[in-house]
Image (cartoon, helix red, strand yellow):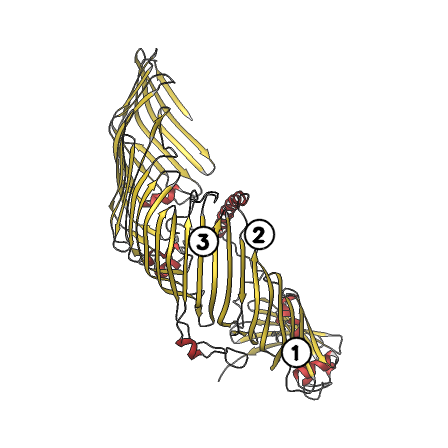
Amino acid sequence: MRAELSGSLAQATLSLKGEAATGSRKFTLDTRASAGIEGRDRWSAALASLRLQALDSARPDAAPWVLELGNPVSVKLRSAAGDNPRLDIEASAAAATLKGPAPGTVRIDWQPLRFSRTGSEARRAFRLQSKGRLQGLPMAWAELLGNGETLAQVGFSGDLLFNGDWDIDAGDTLRAKARLVRDSGDLRVQAGEAALVTRIRSHGTGTASERTMDAAGPGTSTPAGLKRAEFALDAEGDTVRANLAWDSERAGQIRVEASTRVQQRQGGWQWAEDAPLAGRVTARMPNLGVWSMLAPPGWRMAGTLDADATLAGNRSEPRWNGTLAADKLALRALVEGLDLRDGRLRATLAGNRVEITEFTLKGGAGAQTRIPGQSGNLSTAASEAARDGGTLSARGELGWGAAPAAGAGSGLRMSVQADLRALRVLARADRQLTLSGKLQAGLANGQFTVRGDIRTDRAVIILPDQTAPSLGSDIVIRSAAIDREAAEEAKRRAAENRSEVARAETAKPPDIGVSFDLGSDFAVQGRGITTRLAGKLDIRSTALNAPPRITGEVRTVAGQYRAYGQALNIETGIARFSGPFDNPQLDILAIRPNITQRAGVAITGTAQSPRVRLYSEPQLSDQETLSWLVLGRASATSGGESVLLQQAALALLGGLGGGSGGGLASRFGLDEIGFKGPGSGGDVRDSTVTVGKRIARDFYVTYEAGLGGTLGTLFIFYDLTRRLTLRAQAGQQSAVDLIFTLQFD
């Protein structure tokens, strides 16, 4: 800080320049002022210029906040001591401008400001008079003042500008008015597919090559068609009134009127706990789909909503009375396969509770998907398609505040009963699920409870044969933007964890108990398995931040498993759950049919640590059992059949269904493990084992060793072009080859 003070006590001038920093924020002040004594207990001051700047280094691309005085401000102060002390302060009218990181400039004009205080500490009175206005307040500044999600992240954007004014005369009698009114611009809401867009910005390293890419560009959002947006706060005496008006073509209309009373205590105004409340809220939402960004990512909602409610009671116990009505409700999540439609809601607000008198939803139309065969669905696709999507109906109530019944406690309360009747919950082509049953959910004394009995009417689950590709563990991506986002995410999660720990100290664990019956038509296909599943599971959860515990068993019905080119019958297929849902005990036996010898595969252990072994009855050696399993007869001692058996054994080591040996190879960090046979009529000892690893995109190394020899051969492949490859080998024979490849049909 640098300050220059000159003059005398009667008239002094001050020039001040300084900087202050806290964390990533830096503040700069530049001001010139003068002050002096005009007489006994009388002072005067004048602020000739003022410029205050705030910059956040965590946002290097953002402009600073700048507050600048438009014209000089004079201040006069008078004080009087004695039995009735008094203090009077008066500031002249002036203007200032405020600029921020987002485009826009706010102009603030105010009339003379007056403040007076009289009386001693025991009986002190004050009066404040202020009047002014502001112009051009951008909506975009709202997200700059908080540390949470930005407006763009929750789906809002636009060029709204607001004007405001205030008129305050507070003393023995309170009189105040404040308004904030839309001046121009519109609000845009990301709706439909636009809500799925992730905003990405990429900047080059140089000024000339700098580029900006915005994935959520113009045209991806829906204008609300805003006609009016106004908030007003009025105070007269001890009565305070608030009004909110919102009128738009697509985002609905909302009107809020509320009033309460304040009391003057200890030289100030206070809002007491027993202050009365009165008001009315009316809302009409002709298209709830505009607000889909409030739902989870990828979810869509639709429908209409009408609300009309009055407010009464007091601050500690507000009471509502009115109605809520919604029609044509729909909820869709295409990725998950959720499709609920034709919903209807009727609810009544009575005091401190909401009574849901009617809530219904219908399931969507499912595709004509069916797993065929004796191991597939019992119902046909045509009969399922002809059936409607079923219904979900619910009734109940939600309460808050003091309970009306004595001894019932206080706080938030809930009691809801739901009835599912052949409801098609999932309607994807590869994932269909129809459920029936009853559910009860409640909340009392801070504990959430769920009870239910659910049964599957029909299920079609088609599993993909391959999972989505992912980057290898040896690939590391470095990015300053990613690192910065990761640091912000870690900081946000740490704050959430701290708050969750604080909540967990007082929250009660949920009490969930649901019985789930798989029914008789639960068909699964994929990864070589085609089967129906049956069984009953009991789902329980009684601990905070812990996965639910599941007890019961699931068994296969008429199951088949395809492996090594053969269809095995699953004679025993049981998964026993007794704790975590992802690690049941396995008891599986798959037998090859239509052969004289019983041979197959047995799987025991747990899902996370399975044990696979060959099975035969009467018991045979593994080689003989594998021969019966793969060839359907006794084993051969040499030739191509032995190679086929070796490949089948390798598939068992790598995991069921992985006949290429990729499962075993990946465990050792290799790309290939294979066998090469001796050819027709050869000896098994002439077979070779090959291991390979890709070093780079165009560079591949393999090593080949014979089962009956001591020396091996190292091969190096380098792709010069798409058709030209250089191959080098070293071992018993060394050579360099140039291979040209020509492909044709």
Helix, strand or loop for disc 3: strand
Residue 648 marker: 1
Q: Nearer the viewer, residue 129 or 207?
A: 129
Quadrant containing the N terminus in the rendered view: top left
Q: Nearer the viewer, mark 1 or mark 2?
A: 2
Q: Nearer the viewer, mark 3 or mark 1?
A: 3
Q: Rounded to the nearest whole Å, what is the CA distance between mark 1 and mark 2?
A: 46 Å
Q: Amino acid at mark 3?
A: Ser
Name the residue at 30% across, 24% down: 47
Residue identifier under label 3: 415
Q: Rounded to the nearest whole Å, what is the CA distance between mark 3 and mark 1?
A: 58 Å
Q: Rounded to the nearest whole Å, what is the CA distance between mark 3 and mark 2?
A: 21 Å
Q: Amino acid at mark 2?
A: Ala
Rendered location of residue 398, percent (x, y) = 41, 50
Rendered location of residue 201, percent (x, y) = 40, 53
Give the mark nearer the N terminus: 3 vs 1: 3
- Above or below, 262 against 387 in this view is above
Residue identifier under label 2: 543
Rendered location of residue 141, percent (x, y) = 34, 43
